[in-house]
Amino acid sequence: METDRRRTTMRRVDYARYGPPEVLTIVEAPRPSIRPRTVLVRVAASSLNAIDWKNRQGRFRAVTGLWRPRTRQGFDVAGTVLAVGAGVVGFRTGDRVFGLLGNFTGGAFADEVLMRPGQLELVPRGLGFTEVAGLPMAATTAWQALFELGRLRPGQRLLVNGGSSGVGHFAIQLARAHGAYVTAVCSDRNADFCKALGADEVVDYAIRDFARDRDRFDVVFDVVNNRSLVQVRSALRRHGTYVGTTPTPRLLWSILTTSQAKFVAVSPRSDALAAIRALVEQGLVRTHVERVYPLEEIVAAHRDAERQRTRGKLVILLDERP
Ligand SMILES: NC(=O)c1ccc[n+]([C@@H]2O[C@H](COP(=O)([O-])OP(=O)(O)OC[C@H]3O[C@@H](n4cnc5c(N)ncnc54)[C@H](OP(=O)(O)O)[C@@H]3O)[C@@H](O)[C@H]2O)c1
């Protein structure tokens, strides 16, 4: 839907209480006004991340102390710049951009969103908004986990536990582009998918337990978080690193007691987006979009996402034009 400039409201996904997907509604909300040092983006597409359904379920309320939801839905943005605030350099009205909103902010499941320039990059050349929308959170998480926390180097061995997931399918591609040897853990139905993304080896989690391997991996990226450093330590090489994506008590304990365990907390930064954009433009990284939902089907999209069977990404389309 193209936003009529004269309208003062826009569509936005909202939820007044934690609960099942049906707590989500589409409301008419005020359009954001441009402010200094911000960029106003008309959202063409976004994508679902686990944080969206976990926020909706109220999974973080004990940590945040928020007994009513405050964080908005949607973190990935792909769209067009509508206006730039005073003091912004590098972006102009009409630019096609993609970016990632902060973990405690959100708000991408809306026709328009205000962003900081440091959360944005120009879209990769030749890519449509649907594919771009799957990139920001999942690919940035993989990039920061592998290269900032895991310090993965060319020639090293990486294991991705959850190779077919949103984060995992980018991790395989990023690591391969970097010259690492990649083992992906996935189900039998996703083995060919992970190999096509560049995995050198696949391990069917129903048949083989990768944690029984000895002295094998320089980095274990546990996207599924069903393992711990203690369980995978023998599979890690000396000085190898275990990176998890969920701050479970056992991961936090490992971080406190060893230097081998890390937790990736994705941080919206344009340097990661720029690196990802370059790899996409070189044809080394692509988004696998499993399904596209119009905004009106947000409840169905959440239902599908929380089943955790998605291959690649689920995209939310806000602007029907290609
Ligand atoms: N800390 C952060 O900054 C951050 C950022 C992003 C994501 N995350 C977290 O990372 C996790 C993954 O997110 P996501 O969006 O990538 O997940 P996702 O796409 O929903 O994951 C679904 C995929 O996982 C696979 N899978 C399920 N169980 C598996 C198992 N036991 N072994 C291997 N693969 C398995 C499924 O394949 P099959 O159906 O074939 O099993 C499916 O392809 C979530 O917990 C999320 O909260 C954290």
Image (tube, rainbow, N blue to C red):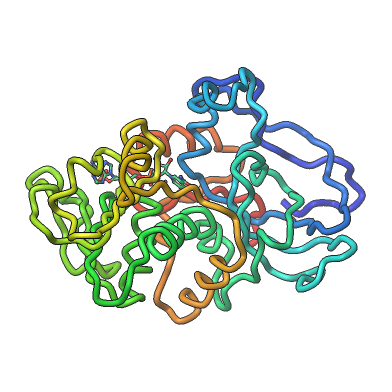
Rendering coords of residue 67 (x, y %): 61, 18
Residue occupying the far front of the picture: 257
Q: Nearer the viewer, residue 293 or 21?
A: 21
Q: Nearer the viewer, residue 310 or 156?
A: 156
Rendering coords of residue 10 (x, y %): 78, 42
Rendering coords of residue 208 (x, y %): 8, 48
User: On the image, which quarter does residue 298 sit in?
Assistant: top right
User: On the image, which quarter does residue 215 sit in?
Assistant: bottom left
Q: Residue at x 30, y 48 (%)?
A: 222
Count all numbered tags in the image, as a single digit: 0
Q: Is residue 205 left or right of residue 2?
A: left
Q: Residue at x 18, y 47 (%)?
A: 232
Rendering coords of residue 27 (x, y %): 73, 31
Q: Residue at x 64, y 20 (%)?
A: 68
* Residue 127 against residue 230 in the figure, above or below: below
Q: Is residue 167 left or right of residue 35?
A: left
Q: Nearer the viewer, residue 5 or 43?
A: 43
Ligand 1 falls in which quarter? top left
In which quadrant of the rendered image does the C terminus lie? Answer: bottom right
Q: Is residue 302 left or right of residue 40?
A: left
Residue occupying the far bottom of the picture: 282
Q: Nearer the viewer, residue 46 or 39?
A: 39
* Residue 220 against residue 81 in the figure, above or below: above
